[in-house]
Amino acid sequence: MNLLTVFEAVMEHGSLSAAARMLGMTQSAVSQALGRLRLTFDDEVFVRSGNGMRPSNYAVQIYPDIRAALSTIRAVVESKKFFDPDTSERNFKLAMGDYGEHLLLPELLHVLAGYGGALTVQNHPNTDPAVIARLEQAQLDLLFDVRRPVSASIEACELLTEELVVICREDHPRLGESLNVAGFLSERHVVLAIGDSSHTLLERIPGMQRTGNRRIAARVNQYVAIPRLVEATDAIATLPRRMADYFMEREAIRILPFPFPGAVFDVFMAWHRSFNGDAAHTWLRDSVKNLAERL
């Protein structure tokens, strides 16, 4: 790499002294580097011409590719120090579930669209058993989960606090403005169950651990299916408050307090500690935190 930067400097400035000043090297050190380049390329590379240096035909031939390669390397190095969303083509790899895709991801895409770059997002399911391993290998930029990952290579912060509520159809024949435990357990429920239900967001919340004897009317794979089923039947469902508020504006449903204590949970954002010095990643984390404060 050092030899190639000397090659580039001499090509651009045409003299050893000018190249030495640009590189912060002595003229003798530049001359020695050219000697090593001649051995490496098995070519004269540069020959003296008057007060300057003239490149060989081979040097002229390889210069465009070497300059392009050095520019790419510099861009990668500088990207950790400086990030411009108006010019970047960074693809951010996230892992979030249905909750994040529904509430956070649209807002994040709106932010990205406000810049002139070609910023993109690729989301992966946070229920994948290998998601923590992928985060530990820095294959993901951010993971969103209700559990804080425990790993020496992973850092995390609390993104927001959420509460559970119950939704029912607007004209439910038996439910008033409140719901006790007996009433909750006597109604039929629509539940989110993606594969092993213990991996879904709700089933990992302490307040839900006392609801195992619910009467299940339907198990669905997406949050978005729940309010329509609740609206069309007498079944009820448990949702995070922000998601319930969103659906209540669009469906004929209403919100009731969750009857069990401990129905509050935190959502964490986690990343590999190697990203701490990455300017683009820092910008992404700050953007997500700002969005979460407004949700």
Image (cartoon, rainbow, N blue to C red):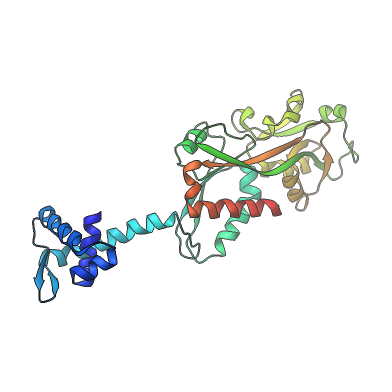
Q: Quadrant of the N terminus?
A: bottom left
For the image shown, how many numbered marks are present on the structure? 0
Q: In this view of the protein, which residue sits in the foreground, 23 or 111?
A: 23
Q: What residue appears at the point 76 percent right and 44 percent down from the top-left corner? A: 241
For residue 27, side relative to residue 125 (left or right) = left
Q: Which of 278/105 is in front?
A: 278
Residue 34's x, y, as percent?
15, 60
Q: Is residue 286 above or below residue 128?
A: below
Q: Position of residue 260 (x, y in %)?
A: 81, 30
Residue 61: quarter of image: bottom left
Location of residue 213 by image quarter: top right
Residue appearing at x 66%, y 49% in the figure: 103
Kindly give the residue lying farthest to the bottom in the view shown.
50
Q: Is residue 263 left or right of residue 47?
A: right
Viewer-side residue, 203 vs 142: 142
Instruction: Tell me which residue sits at (16%, 67%) in the image.
Output: 60
The foreground one among 72 and 13 is: 13
Residue 168 lies in quadrant: top right
Horizontal and vertical percent position of residue 29: 19, 59
Task: Estimate the x, y position of residue 149 in percent, counting from the top left.
Answer: 57, 34
